[in-house]
Image (cartoon, rainbow, N blue to C red):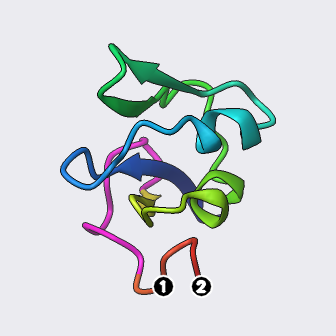
Amino acid sequence: MVKKRAEVNINICVACGVCANQCPRGAITIYKGCYAVVNPDTCVGCGLCGKACPANAIQPIILSENGAKDREKEEKSYAE
């Protein structure tokens, strides 16, 4: 089974909080009003945050079975 997790590009995140409001697991917080942070222990990779992000700053990351990044980023973003 392929496991995914959300990853935020802090260089383009506008800290609007839309992603945090969309996350059904409460895995996203806004750090000091600057950018979103994903809790990897809580995130299930559902993609709702990335679809909602107006800055397209959240991408899915594919994880190996031990939880490490298998690839840098999935070819398709959550936004598509």
Tell me if 39 is positioned left or right of 31 in this view: right
Q: Amino acid at mark 1?
A: Lys
Name the residue rendered at 43%, 55% in the picture.
63
Q: Residue furthest left?
A: 11
- Which segment is the magenta one? 64-74
Q: Secondary structure at mark 1?
A: loop
Depth check: give the residue in front, 40 or 48: 48
Q: Position of residue 77 (x, y in %)?
A: 48, 77
Q: Which residue is mark 2?
A: 80
- From the image, give the main secondary structure of the stretch colored magenta: loop
Which of the 4 quarters of the picture holds residue 66?
Answer: top left
Q: Which residue is mark 1?
A: 76
User: In the rendered view, would you say 42 is above or below 50?
Assistant: above
Q: Is residue 16 magenta?
A: no
CB of mark 2 within 8 Å of CB of mark 1? yes
User: In the rendered view, would you say 31 is above or below 50?
Assistant: above
